[in-house]
């Protein structure tokens, strides 16, 4: 029998957060990951999905922005919630309208700082380093039609030292992602209130 809540993950890259989510929800009583979608045919996230026994599909910009195809894929599989895990494209209006309040993203900084177009991955950590910040963290937020502007659901912080290179900052932020994203997705899907870490 299909579980009550069915998640699709959108990923553009290596898929480390996606793999963490596959593992977290593998034996969950009411939530399952049923699909991984990527805009990058070379994304290792696709291989991680196949290894986990999860269906994986690739789409291009035309399919995503100008056709209902991706939304149809989600609806055909009974997807109830969409999770972005290192997905780099702006979400089009048709997908937001199909899943209002049911698309979530994780950003590797404390929004509204270091958000917006082009602010992803090492770009963010390098900017944080260059600014000499004493802390950074993660922001989990709902997705709307603008980069990194949806309602913030959860933030967690980590302390930085002057000796931390951008790569060290990335490691600290990844640790927060792995620790918090699965649990906060679970709370969000089940309608529990989150908190800040």
Image (cartoon, rainbow, N blue to C red):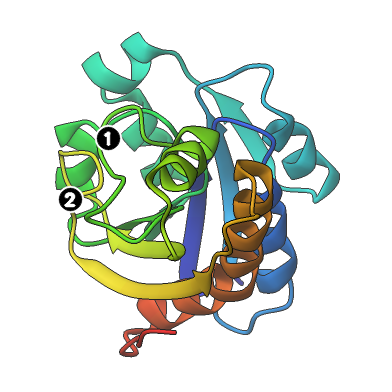
Residue at the spot of label 1:
91
Disc 1, SS: loop
Task: Name the mark on residue 149.
Answer: 2
- Quadrant including the N terminus: bottom right
Residue 50 pos. (x, y %): 79, 39
- Can you say whether 119 is above or below 191 in the image? above
The residue closer to the viewer here, 180 or 66, is: 180
The residue under the point 67% across, 40% down is 55
Residue 44 pos. (x, y %): 74, 30
The residue under the point 48% across, 19% down is 59
Q: Is residue 129 left or right of residue 50?
A: left
The residue under the point 65% across, 55% down is 163
Q: Are marks 2 and 1 in contact (CB under 8 Å)?
A: no
Residue 126 pos. (x, y %): 50, 37
Q: Is residue 11 left or right of residue 112?
A: right
User: Which residue sits furthest front?
Assistant: 162
């Amino acid at each position: 029998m299909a579980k009550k809540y069915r998640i699709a993950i959108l990923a553009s890259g290596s898929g480390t957060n996606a793999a963490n989510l596959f593992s977290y929800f593998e034996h969950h009583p009411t939530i399952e990951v049923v699909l991984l979608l990527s805009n990058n045919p070379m994304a290792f996230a696709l291989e991680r999905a196949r290894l986990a026994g999860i269906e994986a599909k690739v789409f291009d910009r035309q399919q995503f922005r100008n056709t209902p195809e991706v939304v149809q894929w989600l609806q055909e599989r009974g997807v109830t919630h969409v999770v972005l895990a290192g997905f780099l494209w702006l979400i089009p209006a048709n997908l937001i309208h199909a899943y209002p309040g049911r698309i979530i993203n994780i950003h590797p900084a404390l929004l509204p700082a270091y958000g917006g177009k082009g602010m992803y991955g090492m770009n963010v950590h390098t900017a944080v380093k260059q600014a000499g910040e004493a802390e950074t963290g993660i922001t989990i937020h709902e997705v709307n039609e603008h980069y990194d502007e949806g309602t913030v659901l959860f933030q967690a912080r980590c302390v930085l030292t002057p000796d931390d290179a951008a790569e060290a900052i990335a490691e600290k932020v990844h640790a927060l992602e792995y620790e918090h994203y699965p649990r906060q997705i679970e709370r969000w899907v089940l309608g529990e209130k989150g908190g800040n870490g």
